[in-house]
Image: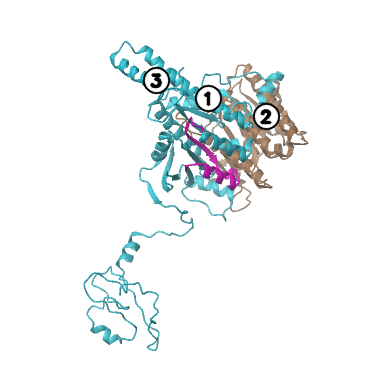
Chain colours: A cyan, B brown
Amino acid sequence: MGELVLRALRDGALEGEQAVALTIKDIVESPFGFDVFNYFFVQLSSNILGGKSQSRGLVLVAFSRSPSFYVDLLESKGIDASSPSTWIQILDCYTDPLGWKDRLMGCGTITNHSWEASSMATVCKNVRNVDMLFSSIVELGKGTAVLFAKKVTSSFSFSFKEKVDLLFSICLWFLMLAGLVGEGKNRFSLAIDSVSELLRHASMSSVAALLSNLRSHDKVSSAFWLLHSDLHESRPVAVLEYMSSMVASLEPIMRQTEGQKGGSDSQSLRENNPWKGKFHARIKRRNGKVRLMCEEFYVEQSGIRFSSASAEVGIFNQGLLPKVQFNLQLSEKERTDRANVVLPFEHQGDGKAIQIYDGRRSPLEGNNHTAPASSEKLQTSDSLGKGEIIYFRDSDDEMPDSDEDPDNDLDI
Amino acid sequence: MERSPNLLDEALGFNHQLSASSLRGRAVFIEDCLETSGSFVLHHLIKHFLSLHSSAGVVFVAFAQPLSHYERILRKLGCNLLTQRNNNRFFFIDMLNLDCADGETSEGELAALYGKIQKAVEAIEATGNNGNSISVMIDDISLMEVAANGSSHHVLDFLHYCYTLTSEFGCSVIALNHEDICSNTENSRLTLQMEYMADILIKAEPLATGLASDVHGQLTVLEKGFSDGQTSSRGKVHKFQFKVKENGADYFYPGTSV
C-alpha cells in the first residue's frame, strides 16, 4: 500500500491537472509520521534520480530538521545529494525561521556558526511571510529544472567519445528541441516536513492558499507534507484533508477511548505497542472513487516498514464504517452459518414446489410432509451446518396476511 | 569519580568510560506533575555532565529557583557548582525576574535569552570542548510560559531555536515541564508539541496505588529519537520506580526496593 501511494507521487499529475498531494497525519500516541515522511522522501528521491518519476527535481521545505539531516539521510540510503548538479533544493526554515539569529549576529551577541552554506540549501529567515515562501519554493523548483537541464547538456558534451552515449545524447538533443525535455517542461516535487510548524507561524487561510497555489502551479508534479493532527483544531485538519488527493493516517494498534486520561494512557499505549501501528490510506482516484486501505507498519532501526499483507477495506464513494468498540464484521463461521440458513419464500433450487406455512397446519400434519421446503418451521437436514428458523404462530385465530401484501415482489 | 550506573543511567545510555555524553545532539524533555516532581532528574543530569571531563559544560536557565537552591542540592550530590562556574563550565542564567508585558515583549525577551544561551555555548566551546558534552537545561518550561505572559507560541519558538543548537553545536537540550498545568487547549498543545520534538521523553508519575513512604513514584524513559539510518538507539522503553533521598535518588524495578 505504501507502494501505491508512492506510485501516485511518482507518476504525478496529468496536463492541466492539479498536482498529486499527500497529507501524512499522525497523533502523539503514534508519532511516527516523520518516519513515514522520510520513507516517501527517500523513495521519491530515488525515483527522481533514476528517472522513473514525472518530476525531475525535489524541493524540500525543512521546518523540523536541519538540511544536513536530510542530506545524511539520503546518503545513508545510497542517494547522492551533494553533487554539484544537484536535483534537490532545500528551503531551510529550520535554522533561523524568525530571523532571531540574524538580529543577534547584527548586534554581535552571537557568531555565525555552522549555517548551511551549501548550494542546495537556502535559508529562510521569515517563515511568516507566506508569499515569500511561495516564490522561494517556485524559484528553487525552477532551479532543480535548470540544473537538470545543465546535467543533460553536460552529459551530451562529454559523451561524444562513446557510441552509445553519442546516440543517447543526440536523442536527448532532439527531444530538447521538441520542447519535451528541458527547463520548460521539467516539473518538481515538493515536500514539507511539517505543515504543523507552518501553521504555527501563519494563518490557516494563508497556508491553505499557499498549498493550493502550489498544487495548481504547472511546474509542481506532486507534493506531500506531514501534519500532527492533535496539535490543531479539527478545521485545519479537515481543510488539509480536503486539499489532498491522498491522506495517510497513522494510529496505534489499540486506540484509546475518549474516557481514558490522555497523558499517562497515551504513554502506556506507546509502551504496549510502541513501535508499530496502523497505516490507513485514503486515495481519491481520478474517476471520483475513493479507495481505502489499511496496513500495519513497524518502526525499525533502519526506518519504517509496511506489512506485506494489506487489507483493502473497500472501494466506495460514501463515508467510512463507524469506528466503534464492537465488531461489525462477520467471522468465517458466522458467514458459513448465514449462508446455510434456508430462507422462507424463496426457491431453494431443488426443483420442489414451495409450500407456505400459514400457521394453521397442526404439528402432526407437518410431520407427514417429506420436504416442506418453504415452510416456516423448516426441517433440519442431515447436514449439521444447516441453519434453521423456527416460528410458532401465537394462535390459530391469527389471520393470515391480507391481500395487500407488501412482499408481492417475492417469488412465491 | 567512578560509580556504578543506576537504572536511569542505563536507560539514558550513560557510559562513564566515554568522554562524550550519549545525549549529545538530542532533546530530552522531562514531564512531571504536582504529585511527583521530576526535578531530581534534572539534578542528576547536571551532575552527569559536569562529571564527564574537564571541558564539558552546562548552560542552565532557571525560571524556578535561584542558584543557591541548585548549589545546595548538587553539593549533596558531590558537585560544587560555584567552582564549576568559576571554571567556566557551569553558566547559570537567572530568569526569575522575567515578566513580559505583552507578546511582542516576550518574543524579544526570549530571543535575547536565546542569544545569551548561544553565547554561553560558544564560550564553553572556545575552551576546547567540541560541543559533544555541552548541555542546555531549562527549569522549567511552565514557568517560562508564565514569564512570557502566557504566550506558548513564543515559548515554542524559543524551544525550536534551542533545538537548533543540537544540530549546530551537538549540544543536548534538556527541559522540565509540568504536564498537569494545562489551563486551556493552548497549553496542552505546548506539552504535545514538546513530546513530538523530544528524542527522549522522561515521565515522572505517582504510583497508581497512591502515596508510599518507600517509593516516591515511577519513571518512564521513552527513547523516541528518529531514524536516519545511522543511530541505533531508538525504540527502547524503560520503566522503573524511584525514591528521592537527600543525596540523590534510588532507582529500582517494582518490588525490588531495599
Mark 3 residue element: helix
Q: Where does the magenta region start and end?
A: A217-246
State the image coordinates of residue B36 (x, y, percent, origin top left).
64, 45
Residue furthest to the bottom: A397
Q: Is residue B48 above or below residue A355?
A: above
In terms of depth relative to the viewer, which is nearer, A194 or A317?
A317
Say which label, 3 or 1, has the lower sequence index.
Answer: 1
The residue at 68%/27% (across/down) is B114
Name the amino acid type tagged 3. Answer: Leu
Marks 3 & 2, CB-CB < 8 Å contact: no
Q: Chain of mark 3?
A: A
Query: Gap in Å between the C-alphas at discs 2 and 1?
Result: 40 Å
In terms of depth relative to the viewer, which is nearer, A221 or A312?
A221
- Name the residue beneath numbered marker 3: A177
State the image coordinates of residue B33 (x, y, percent, origin top left).
65, 45
Q: Which mark is residue B60?
A: 2
Name the amino acid type tagged 2. Answer: Phe
Mark 2 residue element: strand
State the image coordinates of residue A384 (x, y, percent, origin top left).
26, 69
Q: Quadrant of the C terminus of chain A?
A: bottom left
In terms of depth relative to the viewer, which is nearer, B12 or B122?
B122
Name the amino acid type tagged 1. Answer: Leu
Q: Is residue B230 above or below residue A284?
A: above
The residue at 58%/44% (across/down) is A236
Query: Gap in Å between the C-alphas at discs 3 and 2?
Result: 63 Å
Residue A242 lies in the magenta stretch: yes
Query: Gap in Å between the C-alphas at discs 3 and 1?
Result: 24 Å
Dot 3 crowding, Cα within 10 Å, few <14, some 14–19, many 20+: few
Q: Which mark is residue B68?
A: none
- Name the residue beneath numbered marker 1: A140
Compared across the picture, whether A242 is left or right of A185 comes to right
Dividing the picture into quarters, in which one does residue A353 lie?
bottom left
